[in-house]
Image: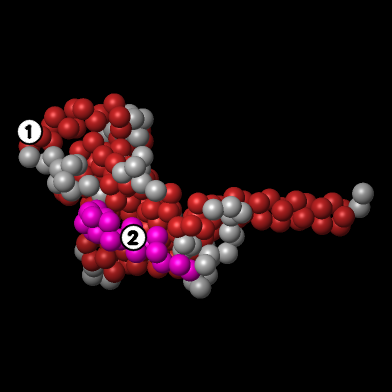
Amino acid sequence: MSEPSVRRAGNRVFIAGVALLILWVLLPIWLLFVNALSAPAEVTGFPKRFIPSFDLASLSFFFGFSGVIDALWNSVKVAALTMILSIGVGAPAGYALSRFDFPGKETFRFLVVMTRAFPLPLLALPLAVMFIRTGLDDTIIGLALVHTTLALPFAVLITYSLFSGIPLELEEAAWTLGCNRVQAFTKVILPLAAPGIAASAVFAFVISWNEVFAAAVLTVENRTLTAFLLQSLDVSPLPLKFAGGAALVLPALFFIFAVRKYLFAMWGIANR
């Protein structure tokens, strides 16, 4: 077989693999929204539809269900607070790891990764006891702190890699032009680091938005939407489950779409 034929065959295999991967990701999301935007009788009926009828009865029933709006608002507040805390702590830590040499630097990096080695169910009981003693149980800030602990390793490692890729000479040039370290960081480094920081924010937001175990264990009155749906999953009709799934997926998709240009820039793709 000639080299052009081998190259064409390789391209076909690559295109087929990408198409299958896209189908694997998008098909469940499409079916979720088809059922969420169809009448309840169509969701439970047969044959199944692949095109939504745009009947909003299921969504109307879901958002009119007692406690849903409060749970949705709690999810937004917890995810936003988690995002702010993760970036506020993770970005300076990533900058320090990339720019300064200090004893135990590699050990610290290892410990940051090791925080993800402990499963959350193992820590649930000690966390619950500590939160009850400190008054953080069943609060937005308490749950946001737990979610920040989950998202912080990603924020530190992503920003560390990002700052390490920005030449130190740019900061040194700013210093020679009269900037101090803070001014050089805010005027030179921070604009270059914006794509990576946005990517870290996306990870933190999505981790908090989708997390269910800590939200179910540590909250009672102030449940997030994931914990609320878990609580009512067994007794909910099928259309309500699809509507709840769509309500969980849609904000994350909108958020990722809003910051897509920073994600593209992070991977070296032109803004679009």
Kindly identify which numbered label has been placed on residue 61: 2
Residue, x 36% and y 46% (percent of image)?
236
Residue located at (22% from left, 54% from top): 67
Residue name at image x 23 percent, y 66 percent: 183
Q: Residue tagged by mark 1?
A: 133
Specify the quadrant of the image occupied by residue 8: bottom right
Q: Is residue 126 visible in this depiction of the protein? A: yes
Overall secondary structure of the magenta stretch?
Answer: helix
* Depicted 92 relative to depicted 101: above or below: below
Q: Position of residue 223 (x, y in %)?
A: 22, 47
What are the residue bounds of the magenta stretch?
54-74
For this rendering, which residue is in front, 102 or 147? 147
Which callout, 2 or 1, points to the residue nearer the camera?
2
On the rendered structure, is 2 left or right of 239?
Answer: right
Categorize mark 1 by other alpha carbons within 10 Å: few (<14), some (14-19), many (20+).
few
Q: Residue 251 in the image: x percent, y percent?
A: 37, 61
Give percent across and percent down for residue 114. Answer: 34, 31
Q: Residue at x 82, y 53 (%)?
A: 9
Q: Give the camera-side residue of 29 and 135.
A: 29
Q: Earlier in the sequence, mark 2 or mark 1?
A: 2
For label 2, the SS is helix
* C-alpha span from label 2 to label 1: 39 Å
Q: Is residue 190 left or right of residue 246?
A: left
Query: Mark 2, residues whose alpha carbon is within 10 Å: few (<14), some, or many (≥20)?
Result: few
> SS at mark 1?
helix
